[in-house]
Image (cartoon, grey):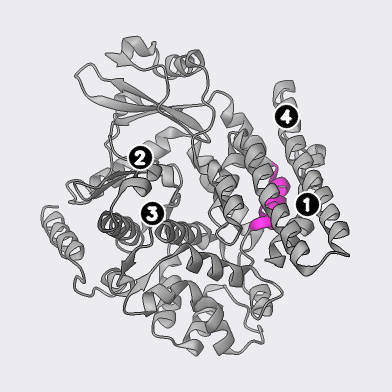
Amino acid sequence: MKSWRRRLWRAAPAVAAGAVATGAIGAGIVLSDEDRRNRIDRQARIWRLSVRRLTAWASVKVRGRRATAEKRARLEEQYKIRSAQDVAEVLGNMKGAIMKAGQMISFIAEGLPPEAQAALATLQADVPPMAPSLAEKVVRDELGADPEKLFLHWDPVPKAAASIGQVHKAVMPDGREVAVKVQYPGVDRAIKSDLDNAELLYGMFAAFALKNMDVHALVDELRARMGDELDYRIEARHQSEFAERYRGHPFIHVPDVVPERSSRRVITSEWVDGLSWAEFLGTATQGQKQVAAEALFRFAEGSIWHHGVFNGDPHPGNYRFHPKKGKVTFLDFGLVKRWGPGELESLSPILDAILRQDAPGLVQSLVHAGFLPPDHGHSPELIYEFCSQPYLPFQLEEFTYTSEFVGKTLQKMLDMTGEYGEVIKSLNMPPSYVILDRVVWGFSALFGKMEVTSRWGRILSEYIGDAPPSTEMGRIDAEWRAKATAGR
């Protein structure tokens, strides 16, 4: 756990530098007085956050110098908890890219104390909504009329509020219940300001990011994808594509978009009742969790390997669970990754080598894909030991995910001073795979919370090796795909 605080210590100057470098980073960009004030305010919040954490850590070092090992451990744990609470409080009130960055950070916090995890988990919950009049103005500006004229019924109280927009329930003139996601006014300026200020984001992520990631690559990929999220027309196209691909699927559901009530800052789609993540986790039986986890896994793997396009945001709020029907509804397609030419082809040999426990083959594939320099100087066995850890669930005949497994695995992959420290320094993640890595760890965290057991390797082989169905859900999925293909 020492590496966690070292990263915060090392990164804080970069965060602070990014926060005060408004003039240099904004060079060539013409900002209005309002935008300039907004940018300075957002940067100042992050700067103050970094200074507070630096000051607190300095206090911990001084107080712990003459303390017993037990007391030092308590001081350090309290520091981690307070840091997480501080981060959650600051970022939770900053809609836009900084909020989204905080949500991404919260997914790699499994190795922190439970209280720290709980604090960061608040970033995955709803955020304060905007006033009803502001939401109505966005609808009016975008769709040309007041919500009361566009819909048979409009609920001014939002059902959910997230980092970029909030969701209202409404009824179409033909009686269809719909979800209307309305973008916060001005959030596009806030996000563009955050994304333009790349150094600020580099500094933030350097404090928390996995060390086998190139922080610049991660941030640059996030910037590209989040730029798309600002235009709900892009999200509508993505959602419509997924809805069509999975139309009629027995356990995967994607709501249809209502194009005549959608625009750049408003997206309307079929309303879906169902349990939220918290409701599901608190009430579902273990069998229902098993079914839901397999549905999540098959949706992700099918999208990645069969369709070449996948949802890169495994946020718990993006799912609605229907345990009695054995179905999961997938929401929010703003952060979608589509494989470019050759990207998936360079990834497949890496995974194949890990699954067949081929250390030399893995090294060769990593070098070829750009994850590892040719002159890395490490033994294939050491590289394999490090890289294969997250894939243990796919190597065993049966595996149960736990939060302990996810946390300990992350700790090993984060520890720059541990046995794999030199390997971590040598590895780099090409930008193409940053979003995929988020999906891998995001689902691992969700499965760990559900403590689900399955033959994960056999299920995966259905998608990467055309193996026969290994579960009843696999058989159902294969039959549906066969019929869907025949009907095209």
- Residue denoted by label 2: 237
Q: Nearer the viewer, mark 1 or mark 4?
A: 1
- Residue denoted by label 4: 30
Q: Nearer the viewer, mark 4 or mark 2?
A: 2
C-alpha separation, residue under disc 3 versus residue under disc 2: 13 Å
Q: Is residue 359 left or right of residue 64?
A: left
Q: Residues within 10 Å of mark 3 (few under 14, many from 20)?
A: many
Amino acid type of the residue tagged 1 in the rendering: Ala
**Picture quadrant where residue 98 is located:** top right
Give the mark, 3 or 1, whose residue is nearer the N terminus: 1
- Residue denoted by label 3: 310
Q: Label 3: state its secondary structure.
A: strand
Q: Residue at x 55, y 23 (%)?
A: 185
The reply to whether the C-beta atoms of the residues labelled 4 and 3 are less than 8 Å apart is no
Q: Nearer the viewer, mark 3 or mark 2?
A: 3
Residue 14 magenta? no
Q: Nearer the viewer, mark 2 or mark 1?
A: 1
Q: Label 2: state its secondary structure.
A: helix
Give the mark, 4 or 2, whose residue is nearer the N terminus: 4
Q: Nearer the viewer, residue 7 or 283?
A: 283
Percent position (x, y) of residue 101? Answer: 59, 46
Q: Nearer the viewer, mark 3 or mark 1?
A: 1
Please give the range of residues in magenta. 197-208
- Residue denoted by label 1: 12
Percent position (x, y) of residue 154? Answer: 34, 16
